[in-house]
Image (cartoon, rainbow, N blue to C red):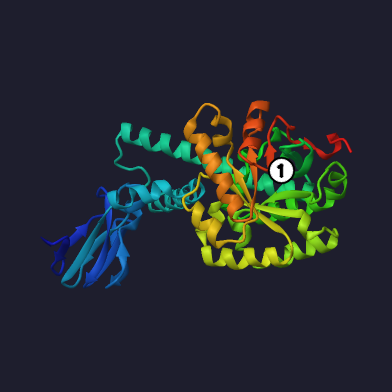
Amino acid sequence: MLNNLNREIYDVGEIIFKEGDDGDGAFLIEEGLIEISVMINGVEQQINKIGKGELFGEVALIDHQPRTATAKAIEKTVLVAIQRTLVNELLEKTDPIVRHLLLVILDRFRTKQGHLQQSLTAPRLAEITSKRNSLRGEATHKLTLANDISRALVKDEFELFYQPICALDSCQIAGYEALIRWRHPIQGLMPPLDFLWLAEQTGQIREVGLWTLERACRDWPVLKKTTKSDLPFVSVNMSPSQLIGESFIEDVKSIIAFYKMPPIELKLELTETVIINNPDLALQLLMQLTELGSTLAIDDFGTGYSSLETLDRYPIGTLKVDRYFTSSMLASPQSREIVNSSIHLAHSLGMDVVAEGVETEDVRRKLLELGCNYGQGWLFGRPAELTNIKT
């Protein structure tokens, strides 16, 4: 075997690796033909022939255990070696459920072939077992939680809490933000950070998002009675996955029509992630939403990567200043300047501004001095169930 510029050249009859050898990578066939064989009842038997463009040795590339077959060149062959180190990071970044399922399949394959864990030293076996147990636990947790989310949608276990958004000059309620909670039968009341991340990954967020929109529209006539504004509103969060749903716009139209929701009183909140992932599609869909009469709010402003471009290109009606800057603005000149600049920028573009994280009277007064329109935070009220909101 000769090595030339990361190419490995094998003559006819040369062994590339033997069954049971340590595995540390795979090979791509650039030229030639490879015979794959295994030992069955002590007799070597050919199971496959593979040629140009094919990959082999991939099992060891994934789990770094002994080879499950013998590979031999039956023509003069040129191979490109793919070392495991090249894919280690890719595998580590792969979702735990996918990695777990992949390793389960490989383990069963190796068990069937009689190769599972053979020739492994005790320390190496202990290391592999520890990693597998950790991965199995993470994957099992995610699978269980995803199944529970599906059940929660059917059993109506989700609830909406509403946090008031108040005019900073009068402290009167102008609107509400709808915030989902999960009353889990075992774990109790769960905040969105504990489950929405998984719903986003599995695509369940589309159903959860529509449930949230529907429930907010259903509750709005009651909530509206508590507001004192010429343009009252309820804000509902959108996720990136919702926008790529085939029937998203039609679903929104149907919900608005069914509950006779005035579109101008529905504010849809999005983060820059929605736009960054698919800017052209986002622009098209957001324009359709505003054509319905609803307004759009950009959430967590100042924490993204393309805020100015977002405000310039997309039909945003409200800018929400992230609580990080609001809460630190009295102590940090930098945060105060970011808040001040954000307010003036939004107003110059015809937007109103909501400051999140308003917890003290001093912060409210400073925001009012800077020209901010609305505030949201514990100073005005914590998120509450509809039944606990006084009408």
Q: Quadrant of the N terminus?
A: bottom left
Q: Quadrant of the C terminus?
A: top right
Residue toward you, 381 or 56: 381
Q: Position of residue 372 (x, y in %)?
A: 64, 41
In the rendered image of this protein, does residue 94 appear above or below residue 38?
Answer: above
Q: Position of residue 160 (x, y in %)?
A: 76, 43
- Judged from this view, the residue extending furthest toward the front is 369
Q: Helix, strand or loop at disc 1?
A: strand
Residue toward you, 19 or 188: 188
Marks counted in the figure total 1
The residue that appears at 64% across and 26% down in the rendered structure is 362
Q: Is residue 143 left or right of residue 165?
A: left
The residue that appears at 84% across and 44% down in the rendered structure is 223
Q: Is residue 27 left or right of residue 127?
A: left
The residue that appears at 54% across and 36% down in the rendered structure is 325
Residue toward you, 375 or 136: 375
Q: Position of residue 266 (x, y in %)?
A: 75, 55
Can I make out residue 365 in this image?
Answer: yes
**Residue, disc 1:** 180
Which three-letter amino acid code belongs to the residue tagged 1?
Ile
Can I make out residue 300 in this image?
Answer: no
Packing grade of label 1 (10 A; few <14, some 14-19, many >=20) is: many
Q: Is residue 133 left or right of residue 171?
A: left
Q: Position of residue 244 (x, y in %)?
A: 60, 63
Residue toward you, 217 or 89: 217
